[in-house]
Image (spheres, rainbow, N blue to C red):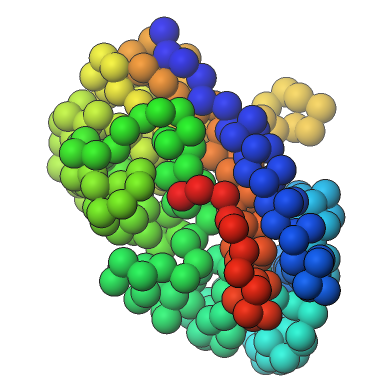
Amino acid sequence: MADIIDGNAVSDRIKDELSENVDALADEDVTPGLATVLMSDDGASETYVSMKQRACENIGINSVHVEIDPEAPEQELLDKVDELNEDPEVHGILVQMPVPDHVDERKVLQRIDPMKDVDGFHPENVGRLVAGDARFKPCTPHGVQILLGAADVDTTGKDVTIVGRSNIVGKPLANLLVQSGENANATVTVCHSKTQNLEEKTKAADIVVAAVGVPELIDGSMLSEGTTVIDVGVNRVDADTEKGYELVGDVEFESAKEKADAITPVPGGVGPMTIAMLLYNTVKAAGLQHGVEVDLPDA
Ligand SMILES: Nc1nc(=O)c2c([nH]1)NC[C@@H]1CN(c3ccc(C(=O)N[C@@H](CCC(=O)O)C(=O)O)cc3)C=[N+]21
C-alpha cells in the first residue's frame, strides 16, 4: 500500500514561508499584486480563479480580478492586458485558460509583459526555461518538483514517464526534470495519444506523472510495484453528489495505490501545489520589479 503524498500540507508549508516573504517586502513598502483575468463562464474556471484570489488574500498579496464577457472581441482582452502591464501595483498577470475559440491564445500570452508572466507561458520565459535559466517556472510542473522533494523521492538518475505533452504541464515538466539541479537529473520519457505500448513505458518507470486530462486512464495494471505516482489530472465527472460531479484524476487511485510506493490523491495532491507556486511566482515578480532580494522557499 502506497504512502499518500499530502499536497495540502506541502502547499500550506510553502504558503507559510511565502507569507514571511510578503512581510519582508512590506518592510520595503512593496505589496505584491496579482491580476487574474477570466474570459469564460465555465464553472471550473470560475472556481479555480476564485481559489487563486482567496489564496493571495490569505498571505497578504493584493488580488485584482477582471472579468471579460466571453462574447467580447479579442481586442478587449488585449487592451486589458496592456492596461495591467502598465499598472505598477500589478506584479503578476494570469489570464485563465482556456480562452474562447475566437481569441488567439498565443497572441494573448505574447502580450503579457514577460516580467509579469507568473504562469511562465510567454515565449521568452519558455525559452529561458528550456535553456536552464528559468525566470518563472510554470506553476504545475514546479509544484510537482517541490512535491517530489517534500516526499523524499530522489529523481536523480531515475526513469520518469510523463503521460501528456501539453505546453502547461508535460513539456515544461520534462524540460525541468532532465536539467541538472535539485529535484531533477532524471531520464524522461514523454508519452501522448500516439504513443505505442503506453503500458510498457509506464511499467518501466520509477516515477509516473499523469497529465493528460483523461479520467482514470492509468490504472494499477500499468504500473510496476514500488512506483511513485503523481496525478496531475483534475477531471470533473458526473456523479450523484450535491454538486452533481466529483473530481477524479488521470489515475485510477484504488488500483494504483496497491502497486505504488507513494501516490498523490485528487483532490489534495498537485492542485493545491499549483496555487502555492502561483503565489511563489507573484512574490518573486514583485521582488524583481522592485529590485528587492527575496529569500524564496527552496527549489
Ligand atoms: N492561466 C492559467 N493558469 C493556470 O494555472 C490554470 C489555468 N490557466 N487554467 C486551468 C488550470 C487548472 N488549474 C488548477 C489549479 C488548482 C487546482 C486545485 O487546487 N484543485 C483542488 C480541488 C479544487 C476543486 O475542488 O475543484 C485539488 O486538486 O485539491 C486545480 C486546477 C490551474 N490552471
Residue 67 position by quadrant: bottom right
Reply above or below: 57 against 203: below
Residue 152, horizontal then vertical, whole percent: 40, 28
Residue 11 position by quadrant: top right
Q: Residue at x 37, y 74 (%)?
A: 128
Residue 208, horizontal then vertical, whole percent: 32, 34
Determine if residue 205 is in view: yes
Reply above or below: 37 against 79: above
- Counting the numbered discs, the total is 0
Quarter that holds the N terminus? top left
Determine if residue 54 is in view: no
Q: Residue at x 17, y 29 (%)?
A: 204
Near-viewer residue (135 or 265): 135
Near-viewer residue (13 or 42): 13
Does residue 17 appear left or right of residue 260 in this picture? right
Does residue 123 appear left or right of residue 31 in this picture? left
Residue 151, horizontal then vertical, whole percent: 45, 28
Does residue 94 appear left or right of residue 107 in this picture? right
Reply above or below: 254 against 174: above
Near-viewer residue (295 or 220): 295
Does residue 196 appear left or right of residue 152 in this picture? left
Q: Residue at x 36, y 30 (%)?
A: 153
Reply above or below: 168 against 220: below
Q: Residue at x 30, y 58 (%)?
A: 175
Residue 34, horizontal then vertical, whole percent: 74, 68
